[in-house]
Amino acid sequence: MDKAEVKQRVQDAFADMVATALELDGETYLSQALLQTAVANAVFPDGVNDEAAYAQVVNWAEQVAAHHGFVESVTLTPPRVPFGRAGRYWRRLPELTQELVTTLLADLTPWSSRTAPEQTLVRRDIIAAVTTAVHGAAAPSASHSDLADVVDAHMTALGWTPDGDVYRQALTGDGVAAETAVVTFLQTQSCAVTFHQLLAEAAQAAYGKPYRTYGREQEPWLAALKPVVLKAVQTANYHEESDHVFAPRPLPMPDDLPQQIELAVDNATPTTYVWRGSSRRMLLAADIERVVKRCLPEPVSDYHWQQQLQPLIAHALAARGFKTRKQQIRSEKLTPQPATAAHWLPVYEHTVSERVPDDHTVCLGDRTTMPAVWAPIAVIDERVRELICLRLVGPLQAVKANWTKVVGGSSSGYRLLDTYLRGRKAVDYTVVKATLPIGWADWIILHKQAGMATAQPEQPVYVLVDEKDGVVPRRFFPLLNCTLGTPLQPHWATYLWRMGVTADLIQPAAEHAVGWQAWRVAVSADAAWDEILSAGLRSGHISMRDEAGNAIVQPDNDLISRYTVDDALDDGTLLPTWSPDSPLNGIGSTNSSFPLGTVVMKPGAAEMGETIDLLTYLKRHAACDWGDVDAADARTNDQALRDGLRLLSAYETPAGKLWIISEADRSVTALLKPAEY
């Protein structure tokens, strides 16, 4: 039986027992044993078979009796009652009315809460006053607890909520003033705002005090403000951009705008920048933005540019191998020279550069004792100093000699593309051997993580790219599908490539390369790939298809759930630190170079706060002191401050390294350890 059915049966058993109540000296008594028997027969028709069931019967009988005023337990014996009716009884207390409770409340003064718009009364004072009024001045102390449930019911009917040792009653707020305040606040904003910011504005106007709102949405007074806030959002022409974040409604854009942006990126004339022996391709940001603006029906604000247009540009750039963040390059270093006269120009850099070699020959040992061979392909992962692919063409003995340096177990190592590499075991590589018509050997040495037959899960894989590949390398999907734990569908390849590059799960493996290029794909980050798939399925960018290519409709509960800042606060992954409207001990909106929003911290940062003053580093971040980042990252932060993008500061502290990140919409600033990112 469910809980409602059990309750009803207990109530029915009590109703049947009321007729058997004993009237004695003007008072009413109810037999405990008979009521318990009636409850047991109603709820357990097959009999009470264990102690737990017996305890439930006793508890239910006591609760239903108390609910109807039978709360004082007494023993009745002859001669007051016949011998056959002797035993334990519940005595019905004198009738307690709401009028009596209301009269008693008039003599008590409630006190106001500092944390919420409510007034409070001490529960034991009310119960003591009611007990004295019902029983008289000489009421026994046991009567206090006997009347507690009855008093709670009357106080609840009068609008007071029992809460431990007190009763609470919410104050009535001014809803009209709250709505007006929220509308006025939104009309002065040029960026997205959080729901908690709007609740705080509404609370200030409705109750005259800036009560804390974050993480308290279930409280009645905040629940009453929610419809007021939502109505004000509609009036101000805002919409819910994401969970608990509201932004100006998006501007209407041409349906073919994504295609026009991709065409603008494809048709943009790249310029080159030669640095340290490599040729880097650049796209001038102004060229792309000029074309995009010509496609728009009207000028757009900075907010709409960042929120609506910049993601489309970033997708088009990432899919074509360009970084999505701008960087400043000296104009005189670019070839051909741009027409713009500015000394520094914002550009998008291609993530893979072409090496400018003197020739294509290599010798992996001493040239006086080892012959050189032709190497039309040479790719290495310079971060881990590991060979990805090397093609050796030449006389057989010369190819063998150079091959021995790579996979022959040589301990002396060798240099390739100005990088020193150690010899590796033959099992780490696949060697494809062929003989040319002229008798020369043509061997390809391929890293095991670059081949579908040899790639192992939980290790990064290398996707080789040649000039025949399009935007998405044709080797990408097969490699990812055979090494990633999540099953994939082939038509997701383009989406996975674009989002993988954007999320830095796909990165160029070689700073310099000859012949081919390579991308390093993280396959151990299953959770990150799952989130990309979940977002794609939710947004409709990708869909499940059957073998015939027909879309399969997936119910929402089969998708990976969305994880918001509020969820993280609820489960302890994030810890609330300061709310947006608090002065932050001197770091308010007047002292900060940008809004900090709600300040939160990860548990690791909270541990650091036991030994260091986190507020000191937060003040440095708010003052645009980016800490121990390199010069390039500092310039990126400075540009992000102007463009409204994410900010990241890093500080070396006595307790370890601390990161502080402010989101692009400035709604949240988080303190965390690098390992918690």
Image (cartoon, grey):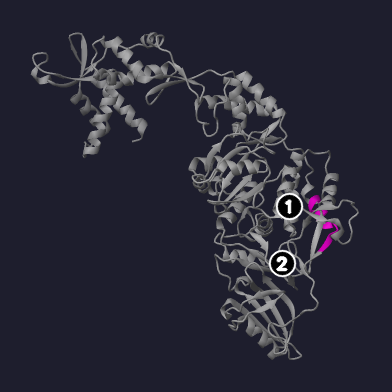
Relative to 669, 170 lies left or right? left
Q: Which quadrant of the figure has residue 347?
A: bottom right
- Nearer to me, 272 or 287: 272
User: What residue type is disc 1 on?
Assistant: Arg
Q: Is residue 270 magenta?
A: yes
Q: CA distance from mark 2 to mark 1?
A: 18 Å
Residue at the limit of the structure toward the front, as seen here: 654
User: What residue type is disc 2 on?
Assistant: Glu
Find the magenta span and give its range: 260-273
- Nearer to me, 20 or 350: 350
The residue tagged with tag 2: helix, strand or loop?
Answer: loop
The residue beneath circle 2 is: 511
Residue density around tag 1, few if under 14, some if 14–19, many if 20 or more, within 10 Å:
some
Q: Quick one: quadrant of the N terminus?
A: top left
Q: Is residue 45 visible?
A: no
Which numbered disc, 2 or 1, marks the residue that appears first in the sequence? Answer: 1
Relative to 624, 42 lies left or right? left
Q: Is residue 13 visible?
A: yes
- Nearer to me, 393 or 472: 393
The residue tagged with tag 1: helix, strand or loop?
Answer: loop
Instruction: Tell me, yes or no, whether the two marked residues, 2 and 1, touch with CB atoms within 8 Å.
Output: no
The vertical placement of 95 against 541, above or below, is above
Q: Residue at x 75, y 58 (%)?
A: 322
The percent position of residue 542, horizontal first and vertical second, equals 65, 52
Residue density around tag 2, few if under 14, some if 14–19, many if 20 or more, within 10 Å:
many
The residue beneath circle 1 is: 325
The vertical placement of 89 against 629, above or below, is above
The percent position of residue 136, horizontal first and vertical second, equals 26, 9
The vertical placement of 261 against 65, above or below, is below
The percent position of residue 616, horizontal first and vertical second, equals 59, 42
The vertical placement of 299 against 213, above or below, is below
The percent position of residue 609, horizontal first and vertical second, equals 51, 44
